[in-house]
Amino acid sequence: MKTIGLIGGMSWESTSLYYRIINTEIKKALGGLHSARLLVYSFDFDDIVTLQKAGAWDQATQKLVEAGNALKAAGAEALVICTNTMHITAAAVEAGTGLPLIHIADCTALEIREHGLDSIGLIGTQFTMEQPFYRQRLEDKFGIRVIVPEAEDRALVHKVIFEELCKGVINPVSRKAYETIIRTLKDQGAQGIILGCTEICMLIDDHEHDGLALFDTTLIHARYAAKYALQSVDLSVHAIEAV
């Protein structure tokens, strides 16, 4: 079994889900008293959010590269960034550490393609919804059309993530608002919805809503990490592009 390094704490609420899911998958696969070989580097999330708000992505990237190298020094054989938004640093982290990085968008795209879908709605932080690093990867690499909410809805989704979900607050009013946004994306042509923030599954935990498949990136990413640890999946660029 390979040792996986988790770059987490962004937020710790979702990182705890990664730890549980990966261990659950390893136990299911191997039985007995088996559990995953995991190393966790957990940030003080406030430090990262401060850099995000300031647009200081170079500094944020350097912090994640340093975290990745700390995990490598401790014995990690591959890395998982336990957040969608900070995959903006993915290429730099992989290059800066020399370790394979299990990319959350790639894992999610494979699931979408298995469902035979080619038009998908995306909800997440404003960074994930508005910047090209995530949407463009799905579009250019996998041929998946990505639809995001209108500006007002993007702001609402973002606000709920940072002011509620990252603090462990589950608000039924926010759930209803998210469900309305999902229905709007369906009306715009979305065949499914990416829950593109690793905290959203705390609020929307169904596998389907209003006839749409929901793609929980936390669950998908963690399951692929477990498969990689067991060496039962090849997540190399060549293998993924050949799917």
Image (tube, rainbow, N blue to C red):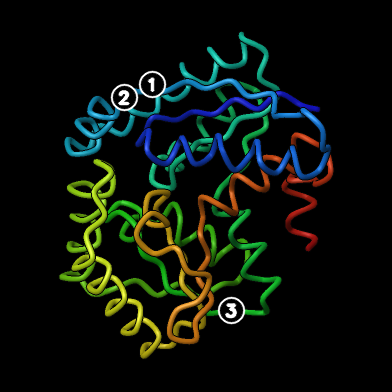
Disc 2 to disc 1: CB gap under 8 Å: yes
Residue at the image point whose x is 62% and y is 15% from the top: 72
Task: Indicate left or right for 104 with 85 as reference.
Answer: right
Task: Indicate left or right for 98 with 68 as reference.
Answer: right
Q: Which residue is mark 1?
A: 63
Q: Image quadrant of residue 59?
A: top left
Measuring from the top left, give residue 223's x and y in whole percent. Answer: 66, 48
- Residue 59: mark in rendering: 2
Measuring from the top left, give residue 234's x and y in whole percent. Answer: 80, 45
- Residue 118: mark in rendering: 3
Task: Indicate left or right for 191 with 121 as reference.
Answer: right
* Alpha carbons under labels 3 and 2: distance apart: 35 Å
Q: Amino acid at mark 2?
A: Gln
* Alpha carbons under labels 3 and 1: distance apart: 35 Å
Q: Secondary structure at mark 3?
A: loop
Disc 3 to disc 2: CB gap under 8 Å: no
Residue at the image point whose x is 24% and y is 25% from the top: 47
